[in-house]
Image (spheres, grey):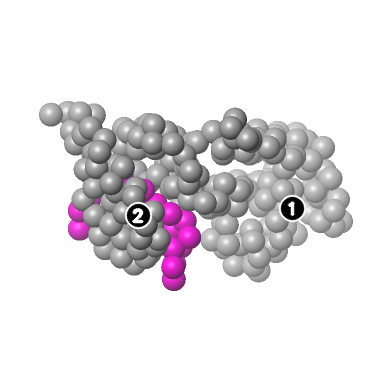
Amino acid sequence: MTVANREIDVVVVDDHPVFRIGMSALLDEMDGVRVVGQAASEAEAVEVVLEHRPRVVVMDLDLAGGSGAEATREILRHAPTTGVLVVTMYGDDEALFSAVKAGARGYLVKGSGPEEVERAVRTVADGAVMLGPQVAQRAVAFLTGARSARHGEFADLTDRERDVLELVALGHDNGTIARMLVLTPKTVRNYVYAIYTKLQVNDRVGLVVRAREAGIGVARPEVRDPED
């Protein structure tokens, strides 16, 4: 049996038992999908995944006493071929950025339909990337801004400085950026000052204006549910 056709083993991680049990039941009804374990915390998630080595982990980001992004990062450090599909309440840029930075290959918001969940699980199991429609436009806008940061007056910035610039332009403070990039606030502050120097701006407001004029950090189009 080829990798593409073999059964998809899944571990479901969520600290809300009703959602975790419901998601597990939904997945078990899908042809060729089998739930082999469940977890409610960051530490338990890592332990269960390393025990069962599933092809896919369905991961919530907000875990009691822990972080789904950190759990994702730790899981992939030990099991890099595992595909992590984030299914969470959060559809904002910060949550998306933290999940992708941690190595997640899929991202859906809770409330996605069964067909969308199944498509995401199979896509992630095959090694591809899947973003739900609620977050896809944000991701495209972010990547467009990141491309802009590689040209013209921004060409001298390092990759990490570009990351920081994008998040500053989106209006995040240094503490939030530090959490999103897994850095210390002091390190972020140093990056911001380095960007000031390279772009020859004097303050954060001038930096945001310069970035947004280049299309970096511009307002994301709102994604509306077609049923609204």
Q: Say left or right for 104 vs 181.
A: left
Q: What span is colored magenta in the figure?
A: 51-70
Residue 71 coordinates in the image, percent (x, y): 39, 59
Residue 224 coordinates in the image, percent (x, y): 63, 35
Residue 44 coordinates in the image, percent (x, y): 31, 65
Regarding mark 2 in the picture, which secondary structure is present there? Answer: helix
Residue at 60% from the left image edge and 52% from the top image edge: 94
Q: Quadrant of the N terminus?
A: top left
Residue 191 can be seen in this image: yes
Q: Circle 1 sits on which residue?
A: 171
Q: Residue lying farthest left?
A: 1
Magenta span contains residue 215: no
At label 2, which amino acid type do we have?
Arg
Residue at 20% from the left image edge and 28% from the top image edge: 5
Q: Which mark is residue 20?
A: 2
Q: Nearer the viewer, residue 127 or 25?
A: 25
Residue 69 coordinates in the image, percent (x, y): 46, 56
Q: Quadrant of residue 227?
A: top right
The residues tagged by marks 2 and 1 sit, at their Cα atoms, a distance apart of: 34 Å
Residue 73 can be seen in this image: no
Question: Are there few (<14), some (14-19), or many (20+) residues within 10 Å of tag 2?
Answer: many
Regarding mark 1 in the picture, which secondary structure is present there? Answer: loop
Q: Residue lying farthest bottom?
A: 65
Residue at 31% from the left image edge and 60% from the top image edge: 39
Q: Earlier in the sequence, mark 2 or mark 1?
A: 2
